[in-house]
Image (tube, grey):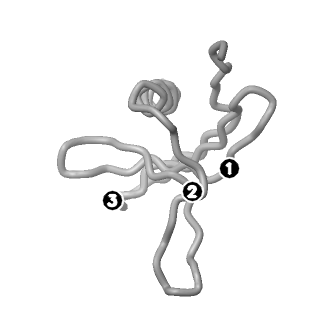
Amino acid sequence: MEDVSLKVVRLHRFEGDSKLKAFADIAVGDFIVKGVRVVQGEKGLFLGLPQEKSKDGKWYNTFYPATEEAKQNLSETVLAAYNE
């Protein structure tokens, strides 16, 4: 499979001391994924992916990368846009 284009189409930063730093919407090829979160963790910034609460009360990711390489690419793309 050829590489799919990945870009940030919207980024909303938050001010203040919250661990949640931003929300982003990303384009994955011809699809838009809403609700990617930029979060400040103990080891630095990381991405929180869109989640949905199930009937058992647990939260499950509704979108996630299939490979470690895809995860790294997604993280680098969103964090680069956040740091601009």
The mark nearer the N terminus, 1 or 3, is 3
Mark on residue 17?
A: 3
Q: CB of mark 2 within 8 Å of CB of mark 1?
A: yes
Query: Percent from the top left, x then y, of residue 38?
Result: 44, 46
Query: Percent from the top left, x then y, of residue 44?
Result: 25, 41
Q: Secondary structure at mark 1?
A: strand
Above or below, comparing residue 79 to residue 24 in the picture:
above
Quarter of the image for residue 6 reads top right
Above or below, comparing residue 71 to residue 55 in the picture:
above
Q: Which residue is mark 1?
A: 34
Query: Percent from the top left, x then y, of residue 63?
Result: 59, 50
Quadrant into which the N terminus falls:
top right
| Residue at figure coordinates x 66%, y 42% from the top left | 25
Q: Amino acid under label 3?
A: Asp
User: How dense is the environment of label 3, judged by Cα within 10 Å: few (below 14), some, or many (20 and up)?
Assistant: few
Q: In front here: 30 or 26?
A: 30
Q: Amino acid under label 2?
A: Pro
Q: Between marks 3 and 2, how big is the CA–CA gap?
A: 22 Å
Tell which residue pokes out farthest to the front in this image: 1
Tell which residue pokes out farthest to the top in this image: 2
Q: Between marks 1 and 3, how big is the CA–CA gap?
A: 23 Å
- Which mark's residue is nearer the viewer, 1 or 3? 1
Query: Percent from the top left, x then y, of residue 36?
Result: 56, 48
Q: Between marks 2 and 1, how big is the CA–CA gap?
A: 7 Å
The mark nearer the N terminus, 3 or 2, is 3
Left or right of 18 in this view: 26: right
Q: Which residue is mark 2?
A: 50
Left or right of 17 in this view: 14: right
